Amino acid sequence: MNININRSRAWWLLFPSVLFLLIGFIYPVGTFLLESFKVGSGIGLSNYQTFLTDELNLEVYWRTVRIALLVTLVSAVVSYPAALAIMQLGAKYRGLLTGLIILPLMISPVARSFAWLVVLGREGLLNKTLVGSGLLTESIPILYTESAVFIGLLQLMLPLMLLSLTSALENLPRDVQAAAKSLGANGWQVFWRVILPLTRDGLAIGGTLVFTGCITAYVTPALLGGPRVTMLATLLYQKASVTVDEAATTVISVVMLLTTLAVNAALRSKSSRAA
Amino acid sequence: MKTALQLTNLTLSYTREQIAVQNLNLEVESGELLALLGPSGCGKTTTMKAVAGLLEPVSGQIRLGEKEITRVPANRRDIGMVFQSYALFPHLSVFENVAFGLRIRRVEQKELEARVRQALETVDLSSFHQRLPAQLSGGQQQRVALARAFVIRPQLMLLDEPLSNLDARLRLEMRVEIRRLQKQLGVTMLYVTHDQAEALALADRVAIMNAGRIEQLATPEVIYNQPATVFAARFVGFDNILPIKILEHRLQIGQIEQTLPRVLNSNFNRAAWRSESIELGGNTWKGKVLTRSFEGQRVEYQLETELGLIRASVESEKAIWKEHNTLGFGLPLARAVFLEE
Amino acid sequence: MKNTNVYVLGVVLFFLIAPFTIVFMTAFSDDNSLIFPPKSYSVRWIISVLQTETFASSLVTSLWLGIGATVIALLLGIPAAYALQRYRLPETEWIRTALTSPLIIPGLVIGVALLRQFVLIRDGSVNLALLVGHAALVLPYAVRVVGASLANLPRDIEDAALSLGATRGQVFWRVVLPNVRGGVAAATVLAFINSFNHVPVSLFLTGPGVTTLPIRMLLHMESSYDPSIAALSMLVILFSIFFVLITERLLGLSRYM
């Protein structure tokens, strides 16, 4: 087919979805984000200035980034051995294990966070166990701390990293590990010199998904962080519906978006090809 | 003979910048099997796609029988196509794959069943009609693809490298099978391949294609014995192609002049020999054995000579030279093909 | 090293799965407040949840919203995925990025933007904005999953159907669609489940009258601390598992993740 026929045919098929997205998504979100630059009847950066000079906002921002980075890092560190184990256990168990990892992703974040309320509360399972076993003399606050948010987000996001790494390992050329070992590499050397470089695309994709998920998650910080551990998402909700501060709402939205885009770009440039 | 397919000044291209086929002219006669032979990228598959209607020509004309079909959509061309990948419908049984074209044509159920059954019988797959394509071997899939294409009784069948995914033994078998089918059905076939042995064995006529043009169109015998261009000669196995000069009745190769047995066009500037035409043991030229490889009936030699690298092949019992030996050889003019480049 | 890996995998799976057993145990609590482990067991909270009018109406809202968003996403996403897969034009990469962009925009931003630009400024309907938001949110799943499935369908097969006389429409319905039905089913499940469980987009777009089930659960958790949320969570989890298992059984959903 010649190029013009292709183009017109492609456009007829793409037109409905593109139109829908323009009207229902790109236009409202775009204009909304642009409002962050509106100052009186002109444009400027004073909304950003106001937002960024508030110590409290900065604290929320760094807390969000810190927790997101930590969750990304920990999930990567934990997922590598777990994904390698899935490979080692062979095709027989792969379906079942993959199913068990996907399952939490299919379950409501509200239900998932709720479980942690029961575990992490002052009278919760964890405190009872720790006190009961004599490790603690009295129960400590875990719920409504950064630790609780971290644990909740880790459970929420870990499957994304694990799935990315599993599929990256599946695509490893066969026998590279054996080849490296035959050349005298020990377990750690095989990991650092062979597995890690060959799976960094999967790591980048997983990292992007986890980090983005942490920045944008609302339910987990709202339920497990409580009023004391405010994150960007919960702050956005407060500014939008409690204090109705429109300037701050738009600024937080842009900041959230820029942060996720920046990390996406950074992680993608680290991988050998944009996937 | 009636003309089944006529391509006139056909120019084809995938992108605006690159021309894949330039001003191609070709006539396929009714009932013949014509092979388009050439290396990958020579434009043979592109030409076939244009005939099938899957690629719109930049310019030129395609006629099928009496009808001009240059701008007729693929689904109204009445051409059966067999793909390199077989392209069977994975979700349909063998029976339904073959029946597909008939169902589209709304052939009545009774006739449809009879025709599909007969087609499956022709390719010897009657007992496989309920299987899915994935449950068949490569050769069986190929035969389903053939049956699916000819059951609609097309005016023309196109076969795009149909044997390239089969192993060597099966390829020979299917070659015979396709030839038998073509004769039995009396269908006109345009057959694309890069394998010269396949083209020469199967076709009534062979068109050698190179860089979007036809270099030579002739019967397999002519192609094999008298290639018309340097490219065609190299493609059908003339391994030794040497520069020559023709001066009236004399021929100069390297520093040596010989008397020509007959008058030749003085435009010829190349002479070509097959490796088995080189006479080893003569004393016209000297060479040194670079490699010697035993191929069963024959032994293949690569010689380093003043004329450059020469490939020669002799019956094993006469292959007395070892590596690094020096020997003499001759280039018999009677067995040379003279070419122009 | 190998044993360490398996051990880590075991801990990870425990960490991922164990919390749900806690939800299940709490759901069968007979206590009036949320204590773990429960002092005694009964099904009274489960029955009470099933009889609560607000939960039932929220469930209906969420089901309709999920179905509506999924249908829109499939109707728009399947042709788009087909075009992106089959016609490689210079601009298709941009369109692919645009079509999958709802995945990287925070849900809260989508929700608050739709609320502001459609409902507050243009006086549009909140329900429509909610539906549009959810459809945009799950559209990427349809485009991606169906696209991945199409990528496995060789183009030759469509050309073969064309050469046998099929029209473009017949090629799509008789050849393309039957061969990507697994992908379409997987996209349907992913789109529906994601809409059904989603909170951030809905947060700003629900009000009295129309409240999705996850939002209702959040609101309930803020106001009371009893086992009814455990019971409800369990029912929602079972619903998701059931839905996923059925499709996994029928079509092997995990191939498309």
Image (spheres, rainbow, N blue to C red):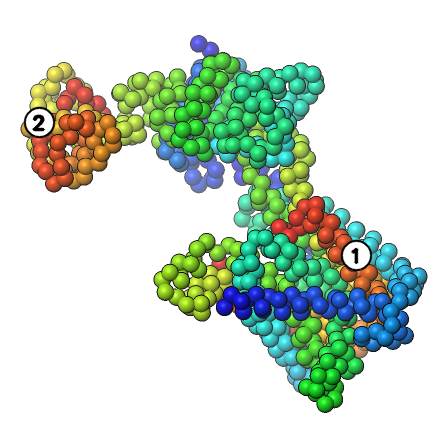
Classify residue B157 as left or right of residue C255: left
Q: Of discs 2 and 1, which sits in the foreground?
A: 1
Tell me, yes or no, whether dots 2 and 1 are on the same chain: no
Classify residue A245 as left or right of residue B17: right
| Residue drawn at x 38%, y 25% as measured from the top left | B198
Query: Which residue is labeled 1 in the image?
Result: C239
Q: Is residue A198 above or below residue B39?
A: below
Do the residues under discs 2 and 1 have CB atoms within 8 angstroms? no
Q: Is residue B118 above or below residue A38?
A: above
The type of residue carrying mark 2 is: Gly
Please identify the quarter of the rendering in which residue B32 is found.
top left
Query: Which residue is labeled 2 in the image?
Result: B282
| Residue drawn at x 90%, y 61% as measured from the top left | C50
**Closest to the observer: C101 or B221?**
B221
The C terminus of chain B sits in image quarter: top left
Q: Is residue A56 above or below residue A85?
A: below
The CA span between labels 2 and 1 is 90 Å
Q: Is residue B290 above or below residue B213?
A: below
Q: Tell me residue A188's x, y (percent).
A: 45, 69
| Residue drawn at x 46%, y 11% as measured from the top left | B2
Badge 2: chain ID? B
